[in-house]
Image (spheres, helix red, strand yellow):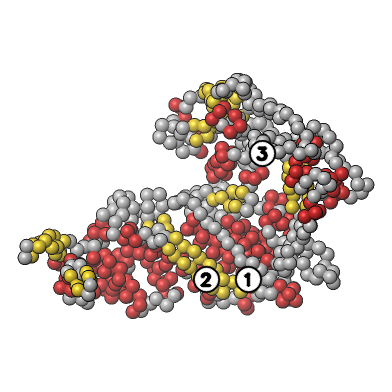
Amino acid sequence: RRRRSDFETEGKGNIAEQERNDVVKKAVGVVASREMRRFSSPKQSEGKGTSQQTPQNQPTKLQLPSSANGNNHRRSSQESITSATSISSTTPRPKSKSAIDIEPIPQQSRMTPGTHVYVRDAHYSWIPATVLAHPDSLASPVPRLRVRIRLPSDWEDRTVVPKGGDPSSIELERTVKLSDYPNRELPLQNLEKDGKTAMGKNDMADLPNLHEAAILYNLKERHSGGVPYTRVGDIMVAMNPFQWIDGLYSEEKKFFYAKNLIWQAQPKPTKPVTEENGNQPLATAASERQAIGYEHEKLGIDPHVFETASLAYLGLALGGSDQTILVTGESGAGKTETIKIVMNHLATVERSRPNWPESDRDMDSEHGSDTVNRVLRANPVFEAFGNAKTLRNDNSSRFGKFTQLQFDVEDTSYANLNGRAIPSCLLAGSKCITYLLEKSRVVSVSQGERTYHIFYQLLEAPNEIKKDIWEEGLVGASTADFNYLSTSSAQEHGFDSGEEWIETVDALSTFGIKGDAFFDVMRSLCIILQLGNLTFEPEVVYGEERSSISSIEALAKLSTLMGVPESEIETAMTKRFMMTRGEEFT
């Protein structure tokens, strides 16, 4: 790390002020000073030492070398600091002797006739249009612009028409106020060279014009083409297609991303290995991927959630540091399915390693090892007891979840001795923390929604199992027999509770919940359902108003199920006990 004195110039203050002054000099065509050459990139400082003048209106890049931080699993990289040559400031700054005062020149408006732009729309948020006439004077208090709406030919086929947004009713010519838009300009469309075709990018950071409308239309174009994933740097945006796309999560696709992003990555040291510096840390950060030996776009790798999981695995194996994947989105966005896909890929990615010895695999387990099997089988349990149908999502998680996968990471030196460039990371276990379960959904749901899946699965269990759990109340029962299940008008299509029951029971047995423990859990669910069948009525006893259970038959069934006398159940449900100064009141 350079000393502070290295970032100061003679008689000109700190580097921030010097950088600003140099940029101003370039804006007026002044040749860069000796101080600018001092902080130029390595390529510019080599040779004869002459400086190259940066064209006006082009960014000036300053390369500042950074040193290694001593971490054996990281490498330092050069940071590229970009300084724009056009300066605009509304905050007065103190003048220095070295400052050059210039008048800001207003930028020429790009809103010329024929320019393809987006305009705001009450129904579609943003809608494509073309500028028809020059704007009013920018100095006008309310400059206006005349535009014409240009809908694509496939607009009706690829656009969900909102209420009141019928394309035939769209006002084709409009006058818009530029004061309603940032910088008094309409956002520009991203078009191909032909000037007509909308530009689509795998990575939205590559869009020439990046703004809200460009992001939405890029996602719309990819979603319409059956491509659910779009990259934004290290962020993966997923648009739920609400259908299963064949081959999208196949084993071949999984091995493809593991092969190209993990096993073919060639780690390189940041500096030549010498006796003085020894082995250098490896570059695994997103900003250093080119040093590893690959770039996504050049390899033609489409964005995919497997990419996110593979890069996390690579960072764990090479960097030796913990990795975090945050999955967030609104209800119905696909968070639950994404988490399952990521966990499956991380847990089984080691199987895709080239020349993986068959003798190291547990052939009795579907996923390669008993530990991996147990980790992946946890999902059906969480979904059965914590997921429910809502108006927007048939399998909505009604709780928060933090899952930690624990890996046994091979030492780098040992991996090198065995000829492995990428150390192995074997799944050793996992930990899951749940929070904020929506308990109120057990007793009350909105119209069109359902309570938790496990209750419906219980009703679809085979009669032989129902007899062992609660013969009197379960055999031949349906949702109409339980108040907690019959209050919703949600349709049952799309659910196969019988198949889900088998999967849940199998998953529970994986964690040792079987036999008597299994029947105890199921009977607890039956008790909850039967409690909802109890009804109450008021009564007066010795002049005091009280409540009593009016559903005698339901109470008798509950008593038999719980093994508790009816009188004790009624007392617990209708009387409240309070302790005050050592005395008990009813």
Q: Please give left or right for residue 499 compared with residue 35 in the image.
A: left
- Residue situated furthest left in the rendering: 542
Label 2, residues with CA under 10 Å away: few <14, some 14-19, many ≥20: some
- Mark identifier at residue 382: none
**Residue 72, quarter of the rendered image:** bottom right
Determine the residue positioned at 49% across, 58% down: 337
First in sequence: mark 2 or mark 3?
3
Label 1, residues with CA under 10 Å away: few <14, some 14-19, many ≥20: many
Residue that badge 1 annotates:
425
Pick the front one: 583 or 521 = 583
Residue 175, image x, y percentages: 53, 23
Q: Please give left or right for residue 245 compared with residue 109 in the image.
A: left
**Residue 96, quarter of the rendered image:** top right
Q: Are marks 2 and 1 in contact (CB under 8 Å)?
A: no
| Numbered disc 1: secondary structure | strand
First in sequence: mark 2 or mark 1?
1
Label 3, residues with CA under 10 Å away: few <14, some 14-19, many ≥20: few
Q: Is residue 529 above or below residue 417?
A: above
Q: Is residue 131 above or below residue 467?
A: above
- Mark identifier at residue 430: 2
- Mark identifier at residue 208: 3
| Numbered disc 2: secondary structure | strand
Residue 3, image x, y percentages: 79, 57
| Numbered disc 3: secondary structure | loop
Q: Kindly report the distance in space between the C-alpha atoms of the residues bearing marks 2 and 1.
A: 14 Å
- The amino acid on which the numbered mark 1 sits, given as a three-letter code, is Cys
Which quadrant: the C terminus?
Answer: bottom left
- The amino acid on which the numbered mark 2 sits, given as a three-letter code, is Ser
Q: Nearer the viewer, mark 2 or mark 1?
A: 2
Say if residue 230 shows up in the picture. Answer: yes
